[in-house]
Image: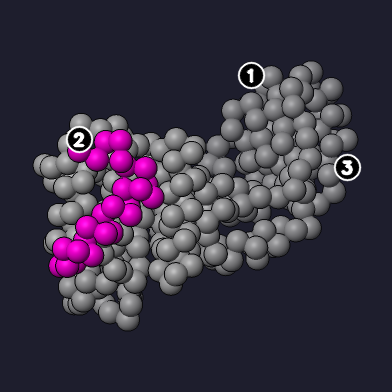
Amino acid sequence: MFGLLGRNGAGKSTLIKAMTTLIQPTSGTLRVLGHDPRHEGRRIRERIGVVQQGESFEFTTVEGNLDLYGYLWKVPKPERTERREALIERFGLAEFRHRRSFDISGGQKRRVQVAREFMHDMEILFLDEPTIGLDVVMRRVLLDSIRTEARRGLTVVFTTHNLEEADYLCDRVAVIDEGRILALDTVANLKRLYGGRKTIDLTVGPQDGARFFPALAGRLGPSATVTARGPSAVVLVEEPKTALAAIVELAQQLGVQLEWLTVRQNTLEDVFLQSIGSGGEGAGRP
């Protein structure tokens, strides 16, 4: 399970499209299953599955979409029927299996799109934001289904903005920004890189963030990282006790109300913010 993490416009979907032969790379070297997408696209497409962000359905029912997809992949009819029924059960599609795909909700469409790929055998499954529009329960069902297939030998490459998903699902992740890989390792190792630091979650008054967080970054110095979003910030520090005292002292000096202040263990989100910086107010880069 390999996750591509990055902000909007970082290059995640572009990279997926290049790997799946939907666009041609403009430079560099790319190999998928040992093949060059520029010249061996068909050999790659025969061995992969792809779920893009946009919708793509045939003008038939949910059940018909699954069946047609298996037919296009030349899955024999008995096996096709067996797979279709198993996927309808696994992805919770039974209640709307006879409805046209264009007449169901966005979250239901997403489930059909992902389920449909499992109608055929593949070696790599590429998923671009696979859980968009799903509720909490169905998101977990989908992630568990994908993880089950990975344990059976399927390689999965997916993009997400949900760092909890990446933490739950991925063996390895890459953090990318403006087309560059900023961090690449196992989830455990990336967290370990910041093991000597602690995370402080901080919220001030609605109008105080713009003046407080830049001042705080200056007060804490280059060894700390202050990543701000409006009135809230994530602060990574080596000595949380010293940082807490500095935060309280600065708030008193500037007359800033502290709404929330807590220390916690680092998460994958902290690694992400450390890698790319906040792109917002009062941010300090590592």
| Residue 207 x/y as whole percent | 64, 18
75 inside magenta stretch: yes
- Mark 3 is on which residue type? Lys
Residue 91 relative to residue 61: left or right: right
- CB contact under 8 Å: marks 3 and 2: no
Q: Quadrant of residue 96?
A: top left
| Residue 226 x/y as whole percent | 68, 41
- Is label 1 in a helix, a strand or a loop? loop
| Residue 27 x/y as whole percent | 29, 70
Residue 237 relative to residue 79: left or right: right
Q: CA distance from mark 3 to mark 2?
A: 59 Å
281 inside magenta stretch: no
Q: CA distance from mark 1 to mark 2?
A: 47 Å
**Residue with the mark numbered 3:** 241
- Mark 1 is on which residue type? Pro
Q: Quadrant of residue 40?
A: bottom left
Q: CA distance from mark 1 to mark 3?
A: 25 Å
Question: Considering only vertical position in the picture, is 191 above or below 130?
Answer: below
Residue 253 in view of the camera: yes
Question: Considering only vertical position in the picture, is 189 above or below 107?
Answer: below
Looking at the image, is mark 1 or mark 2 earlier in the sequence? Answer: 2
- Mark 2 is on which residue type? Arg
Q: Residue at x 66, y 54 (%)?
A: 286
Span shown in magenta: 74-99
Q: Residues within 10 Å of mark 1 (few under 14, many from 20)?
A: few
